[in-house]
Image (cartoon, rainbow, N blue to C red):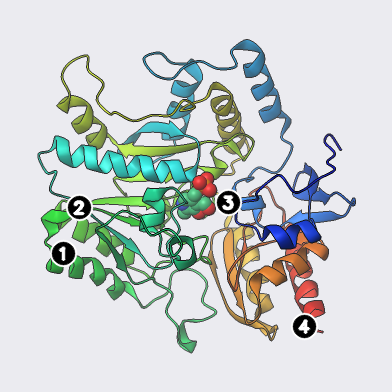
Amino acid sequence: MQYTTNSLENQWMPFTGNRDFKQNPRLITKAEGVYLWDHNGNKLIDGSSSLFNVAAGHGRTEIAEAVHRQLMECDYTAPFQMGHPAAFELARKVTRHTPDEINHIFFCNSGSEAIDTSLKMVMAYHRANGDAQRTRFVSRERAYHGVNMGGVSLSGMVKNRETFSAVMPNIVHMRHTWLDGAENRYKWGQPENGADLAEDLQRAVDTYGGSTIAACYVEPVAGSTGCLVPPKGYLERLREICDANGILLVFDEVITGFGRLGTPFAAQAFGVTPDLMTLAKAITNGAQPMGAVAAKDDIYDVVTNAAPENAIEFFHGYTYSGHPCSCAAGIATMDIYENEGLLTSSADLLEHFQERMMSLSDIDMITDIRGMGLMGAFDITGDGAAMQKELFHQGIHVKFTGPSGIVAPPLVATKDHIDEIIDKLRAGMQRAAA
Ligand SMILES: Cc1ncc(COP(=O)(O)O)c(C=O)c1O
């Protein structure tokens, strides 16, 4: 163990019951491949790719060595009015996989920063087009768009918003796409019914006027809230309504990006191209903090061409935008994804994951299972947070949000790893129920 500590008191932990955790800590001190080890030496399988980010498995030496080399050669350089080659190279590598019209990447440090950056891009675009009256944003119930003020305003997860009253005004929430009712449960892939929920965007247009709406934000598959796969035709209809009304469509691909659905991005999985995509998580395989916004060429062109020659076009950026070490990690990560073909999973592996996830349906406390690609969720009747802790002690890490356990094996997982994840989930839930 590299670091020991005599006190847990001083760190105020994020999204954690601090008092509870400090009574019964769960510290991870080693990670390798698809496994984690806690401070007592217990081995856990990483059933959610940690937080959906460690897609190529832990401890990738290619990434570690690239970051080390970068630290020794040029640890940092300012990203404003000067630049580092690694940021340009990573942007080039990412755009090899984005949809054809999306070729411009703005770097930041997290998914939350990507969301807030994208909100400003939307505003800058409309302003440059003489359309600055578009001040309304449409989001969705059960949406998670990070924790910065813009993202919290868009958020449809009530707990993330209720304490913080001073959020952005003029946000309209569409209904979420998880349809209750027996006929919609235990369905893998895109549900047959529910495309009409996209008419909520049309209703916002009818109510407020299409020319007041700046953008519509959706996670193509709502991830953190428990893997809500969009009904067939739903995203296509959102695209149609956006096009008819000059509204930008933003896909928050922080989880779905980089192979999670079996394609490089959700945009390709669903055949719908957004105007902006927010990215983070697997962009560096979790080895360095990084986020990004990927923009359509038209958006970049309109914003940059609207400014006077030689002037700054977009008054936004972070000290650590395109940090050389994060970019080095990102480049090494893209190389791994390409060399190992991880951005497109085999149909065989995807089918195996689906079958094994659905095999949990006989467990009494489970009330629904759904998913797509290498991401699935199950809902339980009990307390999700308590179950997450219980499963940790049974040797598996799975992320829970409320009653939903979200399973997202690393993209390097084999069928045997998937079997181990499912077997441990079954055993853990049976033990908890006993
Ligand atoms: C869809 C989505 N957007 C944004 C975020 C925020 O990302 P970060 O935690 O890196 O700020 C997350 C994180 O889980 C996410 O799932």
Residue to which mark 1 is pinned: 205
Amino acid residing under circle 3: Ser
Q: Earlier in the sequence, mark 2 or mark 4?
A: 2
Q: Indicate left or right for 207 with 184 as reference.
A: left
Answer with left or right where residue 201 lies relative to residue 116: left
On screen, residue 194 above or below 398: below
Residue behind label 1 places its C-beta within 8 angstroms of ligand 1: no
In primary-sequence order, the first of circles 4 and 3 is 3
Name the N-terminal-most of marks 1 and 3.
Answer: 1
* Residue plotted at (42% across, 41% down): 114
- Give the quadrant of the N terminus: top right
Note whether residue 256 is visible: no
Circle nearer the N terminus (2, 1): 1
Disc 2 from disc 1: Cα separation: 10 Å
Residue designated by label 3 = 345
Relative to 298, say whether 9 is above or below: below
State the separation of the CA atoms marked 2 and 4.
Answer: 49 Å
Amino acid carrying label 1: it is: Val
Marks 2 and 1: CB-CB under 8 Å? yes
What residue is pinned by disc 4? 433
Circle 4 sits in a helix, a strand or a loop, which is it?
A: helix
Specify the label residue 247 is tagged with: 2
Q: Would residue 16 appear left or right of 327 to someone viewing this image?
A: right
